[in-house]
Image (tube, helix red, strand yellow):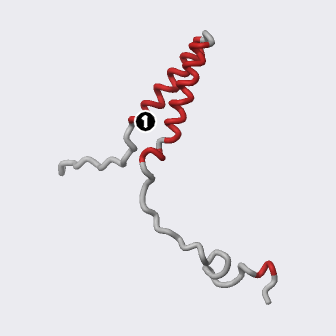
Amino acid sequence: MPRSGDAGTGRPGVGAGASAVPRPRTGPRPRPYRRAGAWLAVALGLWAAVAGATLPNGLVLAAGLVVAALAVNRLGAEPRTPRRAKPMAPP
């Protein structure tokens, strides 16, 4: 009879983790999920801009507008792809 600590000492893939079948990766996540941080930055920037306008605080208003603008810029940017080398003429 195995002891309580011996349950995981058998063959790999047998035992407690045997039911967990590894799933193949299906590629990159959909675009809206990859942009969650940018959407959060837009929301925080707009909140700061409204708070700066409501509390007559120019620094908070300016910071909110800058953060919102940078986040919107990030939302519209396409993901970077590696560039191919330019073909060169032979010498």
Residue at left offset 54%, top offset 73%: 21
Q: Where in the figure is residue 40, as x and y percent of width and height?
A: 54, 35
Residue at the right extreme of this rendering: 3
Q: Where in the figure is residue 63, as x and y percent of width and height?
A: 56, 20
Residue at left offset 18%, top offset 51%: 90
How many marks on residues?
1
Which amino acid is tagged 1?
Leu
Is 91 drawn above or below residue 23 in the view shown? above
Residue at left offset 30%, top offset 49%: 84
Residue at the top extreme of this rendering: 56
* Image quadrant containing the N terminus: bottom right
Is 77 drawn above or below residue 30 in the view shown? above
In terms of depth relative to the viewer, which is nearer, 77 or 22? 22
Q: Secondary structure under badge 1? A: helix
Residue at the bottom extreme of this rendering: 1
Residue 19 falls in which quadrant of the image? bottom right
Q: Where in the figure is residue 25, as x and y percent of width and height?
A: 46, 64
Is 23 drawn above or below residue 45 in the view shown? below
Residue 17 falls in which quadrant of the image? bottom right
Q: Where in the figure is residue 36, as x and y percent of width and height?
A: 51, 41
**Which residue carries the number 1 mark?**
75
Residue at left offset 48%, top offset 31%: 71
Label 1 environment density (alpha carbons within 10 Å; few <14, some 14–19, many ≥20): many
